[in-house]
Amino acid sequence: MDFRVQQFMAMIKAKNPGEAEFHQAVQEVSESLIPFIEENPKYKHAKILERIAEPERTIIFRVPWIDDKGDIQVNRGFRIEMNSAIGPYKGGLRFHPTVNLGILKFLAFEQVFKNSLTTLPMGGAKGGSDFDPKGKTDNEVMRFCQSFMTELFRHIGPDTDVPAGDIGVGGREIGYLFGQYKRLKNEFTGVLTGKGIDWGGSLIRPEATGYGLVYFTREMLATRGESFSGKISGSGNVAQFATEKVTELGGKVVTLSDSDGFIYDPEGISPEKLKYVMELKNVRRGRIKEYALKYNAEYHEGKRPWSIKCDIALPNATQNEIIADDATRLIGNGCICVAEGANMPSTAEAVEMFLKAHILYAPGKAANAGGVATSGLEMTQNSMRLPWLKNEVDERLQTIMKSIHETCVKFGKKEDGFINYVDGANIGGFVKVANAMIDQGVV
Ligand code: NDP
């Protein structure tokens, strides 16, 4: 590792002990940025890197609620308001038992660069709770969301901080959160995105992260004259709509996973089978294993899908789901492209291997930015009090994904023609935020 990166990381680790995912995210970014900053000393003098890695505000709060048995439960709530140099804080809420401060700081940090890449005026944030919606009744989820918002509402607002969904936070949770915000503030505003279509949501928002990922991957493949066929991890929001779009563009998706295991269907997950997955996951809230029973597909308990041969891998579940061994298998099996729908699904070792092998590799902050970009479009529609048509939103999403790809090429293309999307996304996302921070003084 470069000595300057080592020095910087020593400071980050001392200041933020025990936050492994945050260290991982900051290190990846600083490896791209430190050489760039050396060539552009105005960023060094303004201590932009030191400032950008420190949240503007961190809010941690108690979330007490009563379960269906009448017992009191206590969870912890968080909101990390990382950077507001180019717009109001913006980023999702994650409800998952693994949630902690380090994970949310890594996600908020990544969000700053991602939101900048979208071309829209949005700062970066992330939040959530260690609450596990799995196995809870609708009433329990509602009571939890109401208690969570009873504290969060005082910190957010349509011009201050606009949360959205992430793992464990979908349409149902956004509905309960919005209802409680409206009740407390007596205001109907665009304070959350991912809202229901009848009450301020944008068409295409549920599809946007998955669709955007596939649009971005299409641009990457085009740089090598290739097109689609692939496998996907996760079976949640991002995975479902990525599967839909890959299939629409002529590709074949052969795997889907959840935290218990993965299914392998060599015939491909057809639109009819995907409809079943959506009902299974979004309505019945069942396990992916049931797919294998219904369609006579293979089920691999407790495993991840990366050992199955494929051309394109789209990791869409969670952080660090591709480790070095998985990267070896993917490369060995002839995979030509890894584009991340999830945030930081590849470990640092895996990323290094992808870059070394010169396969097409896109980090989440570029490839999955379609979700937050469409949230930005939802904010615009809310401000105008005017909904756009489906086509209009989809076209804007495609234009944004193309533009993010162009930015990555501009800042990431090396002398031998190889596009390093990691450098491209990190530097491309950084410049706008850094310039805004310089313009706004030491705040
Ligand atoms: P969902 O909650 O809809 O789905 C998450 C999926 O990932 C589920 O299949 C879940 O399985 C699986 N998963 C979650 N945690 C783990 C784990 N620890 N190990 C294995 N599998 C796991 O979330 P989304 O689809 O919204 O989010 C998926 C990823 O995409 C996340 O990394 C998120 O940050 C990222 N993302 C999402 C955006 C969005 O708009 N929704 C925007 C940008 C990025 P199970 O059901 O068993 O928990």
Image (spheres, grey):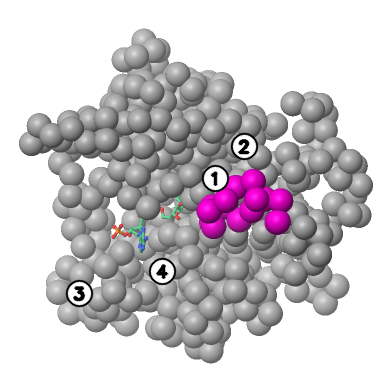
Tags 2 and 1 in contact by the CB under 8 Å rule? yes
Tags 4 and 1 in contact by the CB under 8 Å rule? no
SS of the residue at dot 1?
helix
Is ligand 1 less than 8 Å from the beta carbon at label 2?
no
In the rendered view, tell whether residue 49 sits above or below residue 408: above
- The tag earlier along the polypeptide, 2 or 4, is 2
Tag of residue 232: 4
The part of the chain drawn in magenta is 9-23
Q: CA distance from mark 2 to mark 1?
A: 8 Å
Which quadrant of the figure shows ligand 1?
bottom left
* Residue type, numbered disc 4: Ile
Q: CA distance from mark 3 to mark 4?
A: 16 Å
* Residue type, numbered disc 2: Pro
- The tag earlier along the polypeptide, 3 or 4, is 4
Label 1 or label 3, whichever lies nearer to me, is 1
Where does label 2 land, which residue? Answer: 55
Where does label 3 land, which residue? Answer: 292
Image coords of residue 309 (percent x, y) = 43, 85
- The tag earlier along the polypeptide, 1 or 3, is 1
